[in-house]
């Protein structure tokens, strides 16, 4: 039996959490409305509570103590005393063990029972009743950690936005079935750090991995009772602790090792973070952390009825960004992940919720002002999911300078165009060229647009061309969940088929969408596995499927090999040619009096588009000339950047359209670089003269490079 701690010193109110200083551990917990706080210490298995220590020191609403006998590895939690008056917004219940909001490691699992709720489940007064059962036996525990780590020469890759290619992946799902990852490491941070995985990412050519949530999160009780899990992880409860279920060793250092290994390969690490809500849900949710520490401070409550929560997220609650200590929690968390864990940026889930000062979305909210002036966070990559579920929450194009945004207008336009919808060529052109209508007026650049065709939420690329309807039966919600507006097209048959003609068309559609994405101005984001035909069997909301439905299938097939080779080729093309990742928007006029336009839009007859022709509903074919000679940009040493001139031809019509190649300054010959009508994008009859007709196949894209005639 461990000896009880006998020395309790006053300690300090900062830093928050449990901080090992080499001699002992300082504990500090914010609670504005608490009347008493107890630190609970557990045995090394987390099963038995060994001791309770009252935090008698109370400075600026922070409860604190210092334990000179405490050491890293110690398991702990809190019990917080105060009024239980839900109708007044207060939900203190000392019978519930609470996680430290600043815990840097959380170990053990949440084993659901009615004891996790501050009220009596089934009571006629619902949450106005009071439950006295101890929740500790079924709660995970916080762990004191030693943050020391040998980073050596680790340096942030610091990849420029215009050169960035993002790869969104799930830590577990990416390696769970990878044959070259040792079985004990599959599904873990260590698995992502293996040579096989890193070499695959390097061969693919991506620059940045965006990890779906790795903050400690909770599997919802209703999912667990159905045998499901919160696989995606958008249900955070610990904003400093990497989720332990993805750890092969149970050590925080494993995450750091993963980051260091990816950095050594020149690959950035971005985290998908969920600061808009927590896993405690609405007024009928469990008491796990924030609710029991200080409900009225941490959450946005309904002003005239604080028993209930403001819910801008669809998840039951919204964190109270108006409170300075809550704002501090989020800022401290972000800085911790940059300074201590060396991550390179963040993608903010439902970011509009973070901007709500009152009810409206305020684009100059305190959160954005603070980040803009922060010496640490203003230097990393910041991506907003620019909407929430509240009124006025859709804010695409409205985030401040310094932020990039997921551009769902790009996603919807490209899906609709390639499935053959009419009247879209004007919108298609705006999205292809970086969405200057959304980002140009505010002084932002093309990289403000994070372009994507697929993401974790929705169909995979394979399913986008295989299913007209969602097939979410495995979620056990009667196929009622998930979006119905998918803008997908099954190419003639719903689901998988042996018909070679349909499979060939689906493969071509995938090439069309991927080529368009990688030739568009802005920052492309690929969904992990799309390059090897990953399917979720038609499930467009696989948030609860921690199984083969969601995991990447690495079993090699010929279609996978061909599509992977195509994507590798497209990524290399984009990387090698700055005309496809410009730092500034196109001007559409002669550059510096040279007579060279940086961009020209063309009709199939080879003539320039007129204003009236942009609005023709039947038009599904157009071309765009991109003048590498028209670049006005310089490299990091101030030297002018030049590139070849390219012509990109798009045909979403089902029939072949002869496209007359234009007579333009720069050369009379056009070399075919790729054509999606062919497997792997390789065309065999490669050279055409200006004025001749290129046979642009139905539902295909062709890329041609202008060739000068040597004197």
Image: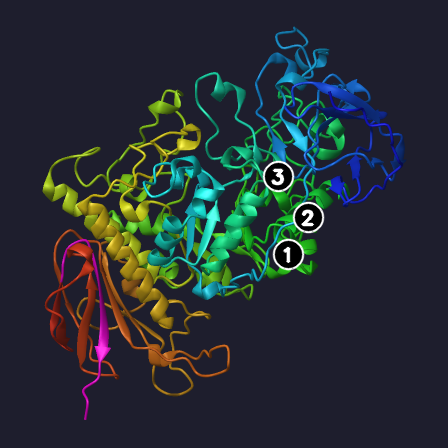
Read off the residue under disc 3.
241
The region drawn magenta spans 696-711
Please name the residue shown 39% across and 63% down the image: 521
Q: CA distance from mark 1 to mark 3?
A: 19 Å
Name the spot of residue 604 as percent of width and height, x first: 18, 66
| C-beta proximity under 8 Å, tags 1 and 3 | no
Residue drawn at 19 percent across, 89 percent down: 710
Q: Label 1: how many residues lie within 10 Å, few (<14), some (14-19) or many (20+)?
A: many
Q: What's the CA distance linking mark 2 and mark 3?
A: 15 Å
Quarter of the image that includes the C terminus: bottom left
Badge 1 vs badge 2, beta-carbon distance below 8 Å: yes
- Against 379, is 416 above or below? above
Percent coordinates x, y for residue 170 in the rendering: 44, 41
Badge number at residue 377: 1
Secondary structure category for the residue under label 3: strand
First reached walking from the N terminus: tag 1 or tag 3 = 3
């Amino acid at each position: 039996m461990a000896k009880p701690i006998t020395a309790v010193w006053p300690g300090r109110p900062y830093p928050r959490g449990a901080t090992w200083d080499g001699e002992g551990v300082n504990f500090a917990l914010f609670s504005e409305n608490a009347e008493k706080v107890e630190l609970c210490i557990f045995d090394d298995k987390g099963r038995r509570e060994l001791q309770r220590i009252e935090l008698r020191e109370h400075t600026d609403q922070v409860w604190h103590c210092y334990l000179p006998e405490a050491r890293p590895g110690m398991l702990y939690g809190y019990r917080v005393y105060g009024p239980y008056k839900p109708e007044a917004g207060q939900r203190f219940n000392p019978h519930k063990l609470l996680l430290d909001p600043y815990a840097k490691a959380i170990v053990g699992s949440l084993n659901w029972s009615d004891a996790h709720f501050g009220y009596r489940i089934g009571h006629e007064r619902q949450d106005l009743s009071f439950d006295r059962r101890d929740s500790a036996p079924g709660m995970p525990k916080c762990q004191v950690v030693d943050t020391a780590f040998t980073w050596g020469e680790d340096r942030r890759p610091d990849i420029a936005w215009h050169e960035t290619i993002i790869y969104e992946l799930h830590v577990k799902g990416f390696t769970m079935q990878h044959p070259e990852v040792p079985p004990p490491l599959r599904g873990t941070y260590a698995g992502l750090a293996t040579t096989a995985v890193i070499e695959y990412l390097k061969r693919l050519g991506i620059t940045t991995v965006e990890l779906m949530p790795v903050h400690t999160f909770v599997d919802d009780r209703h999912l667990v009772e159905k045998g499901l899990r919160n696989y995606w992880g958008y249900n955070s409860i610990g904003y400093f602790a990497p989720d332990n279920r993805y750890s092969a060793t149970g050590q925080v250092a494993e995450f750091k090792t993963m980051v260091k290994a990816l950095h050594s390969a020149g690959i950035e690490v971005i985290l998908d973070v969920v600061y808009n809500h927590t896993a405690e849900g609405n007024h009928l949710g469990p008491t796990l952390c924030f609710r029991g520490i200080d409900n009225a401070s941490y959450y946005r409550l309904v002003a005239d009825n604080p028993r209930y929560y403001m819910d801008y997220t669809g998840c039951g609650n919204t964190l109270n960004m108006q409170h300075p200590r809550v704002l501090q929690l989020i800022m401290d968390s972000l800085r911790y992940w940059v300074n201590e864990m060396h991550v390179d940026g963040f993608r903010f889930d439902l970011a509009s919720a973070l901007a709500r000062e009152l009810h409206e979305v305020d684009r100059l909210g305190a959160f954005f002002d603070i980040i803009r002036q922060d010496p640490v966070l203003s230097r990393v990559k910041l991506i907003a999911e620019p909407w929430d579920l509240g009124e006025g929450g859709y804010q695409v194009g409205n985030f401040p300078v310094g932020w990039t945004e997921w551009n769902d207008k790009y996603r919807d336009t490209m899906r609709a165009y390639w499935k053959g919808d009419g009247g879209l060529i004007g919108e298609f052109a705006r999205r292809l060229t970086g969405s200057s209508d959304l980002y140009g007026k505010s002084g932002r650049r093309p990289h403000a647009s994070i372009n994507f065709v697929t993401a974790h939420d929705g169909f995979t690329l394979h399913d986008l061309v295989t299913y007209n309807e969602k097939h979410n039966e495995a979620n056990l919600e009667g196929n009622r969940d998930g979006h119905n507006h998918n803008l997908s097209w099954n190419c003639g048959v719903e689901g998988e088929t042996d018909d070679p003609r349909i499979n060939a068309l689906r493969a071509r559609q995938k090439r069309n969408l991927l080529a368009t994405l990688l030739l568009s101005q802005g920052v492309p984001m690929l969904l992990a596995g799309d390059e090897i035909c990953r399917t979720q069997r038609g499930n467009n909301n696989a948030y609860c499927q921690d199984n083969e439905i969601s995991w990447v299938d690495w079993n090699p097939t010929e279609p996978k090999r061909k599509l992977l080779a195509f994507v590798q080729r497209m990524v290399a093309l984009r990387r090698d040619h700055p005309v496809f990742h410009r730092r500034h928007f196109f001007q559409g006029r002669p550059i510096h009096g040279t007579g060279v336009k940086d961009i020209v839009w063309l009709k199939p007859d080879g003539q320039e588009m007129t204003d009236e022709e942009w609005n023709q509903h039947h038009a599904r074919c157009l071309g765009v000339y991109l003048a590498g000679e028209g670049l006005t940009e310089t490299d990091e040493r101030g030297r002018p950047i030049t590139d070849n001139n390219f012509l990109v031809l798009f045909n979403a019509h089902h029939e072949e359209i002869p496209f007359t190649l234009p007579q333009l300054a720069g050369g009379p010959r056009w070399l075919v670089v790729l054509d999606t009508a062919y497997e792997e994008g390789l065309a065999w009859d490669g050279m055409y003269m200006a004025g001749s007709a290129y046979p642009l196949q139905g539902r295909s894209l062709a890329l041609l490079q202008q060739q000068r005639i040597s004197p």
